[in-house]
Amino acid sequence: MTLITETRHAIDPATAKTLDTTALRDHFHVGGLFAPGEIRLTYSHYDRLIVGSAAPSGAPLVLDHVAETGTASVLDRREMGILNIGAPGSVTVAGETHTLDKGDVLYVGRGAGALEFGGEGLFYILSAPAHATHPTRLIRPADARRVELGSAETSNERVIIQVLHPEVCDTCQLVMGYTQLATGSVWNTMPAHTHDRRMEAYLYFDMEADARVFHLMGEPSETRHLVMANREVVISPPWSIHAGAGTGAYTFCWAMAGDNVDFTDMDMIAMEDLK
């Protein structure tokens, strides 16, 4: 098997204002995920969140030692959320095998040891430092908290599937779920917001090969954008807005790490303040 890792350092908003498209993508865009037969991880210095993927393609992949964490095993001082966005697959943790269909999430608590990915699943991996141990748990869409928002008239009709959420599953700091836009809707998270106490990451998926999402980022008074293709990730700093519009409907997985697990901890930005 192949394990590929990289590190992304945090930068301040004043520096971000000076970056061109290539530099913005170098800092905040993560591509090349879900390569068959590989585990790919990006270690971010924003709240030490790890984003990555495992694509076993029928041959088992084992995730254990990751040098960037400074521990013998990646979960020695971390928790993890794993979302399957592909065909059925399995994740084995501490001798127990969990079968994940598309849309299922496996929460893995601190100290669980090595993980083995199997089957044909496409596993999106999120991991954050943990101060306590919570039980490993498989969460299916029927177990999640559903919030329906928006309307066809404003092109943002969507359902939010809240999975790693205080009303669904205990975690240390990971908050995670995914949002599905209805056919004909393209806007997400608008009006925009920031949350200075937490960073966030977005994985865009369930997109056609030629579809794109224009992801808005930056300070409210100094916005920028990244053009996102299917199965690509944006690392969103605490000082940045995170919103976007696509060329068609799509799904995105959102995940947060930081001071708290309050999903509603947001600083809303008025439309007239966006520039």
Image (cartoon, grey):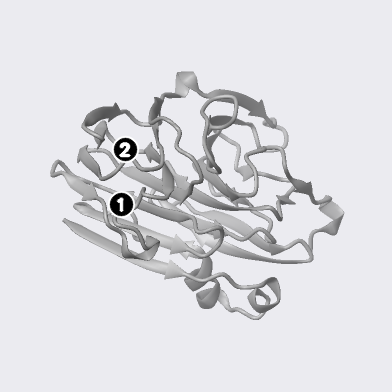
| Residue lying furthest right | 272
* Left or right position of 182 against 125: right
- Percent coordinates x, y for residue 201 in the rendering: 53, 52
Looking at the rendered structure, the kind of residue marked 2 is Gly
Circle 2 sits on which residue? 86
* Left or right position of 74 against 147: left
* Left or right position of 41 against 154: left
Dot 2: what SS? loop
- Percent coordinates x, y for residue 75 in the rendering: 36, 48
Residue 182, visible in the rendered structure: no
Circle 1 sits on which residue? 34
* Left or right position of 274 against 143: right
For marks 1 and 2, give the CA distance: 10 Å
Residue shown at the point (19%, 52%) measured from the top left:
37
Q: Quadrant of residue 168?
A: top right
Label whose residue precedes the other's in the sequence (1 or 2): 1
Residue shown at the point (64%, 32%) measured from the top left:
157
Dot 1: what SS? loop
Which class describes the residues within 10 Å of circle 2: few (<14), some (14-19), or many (20+)? some
Q: Are marks 1 and 2 in contact (CB under 8 Å)?
A: yes
Assign the N terminus to one quadrant of the image: bottom left
- Percent coordinates x, y for residue 193 in the rendering: 73, 50
In the depicted structure, whether residue 270 falls above or below residue 30: above
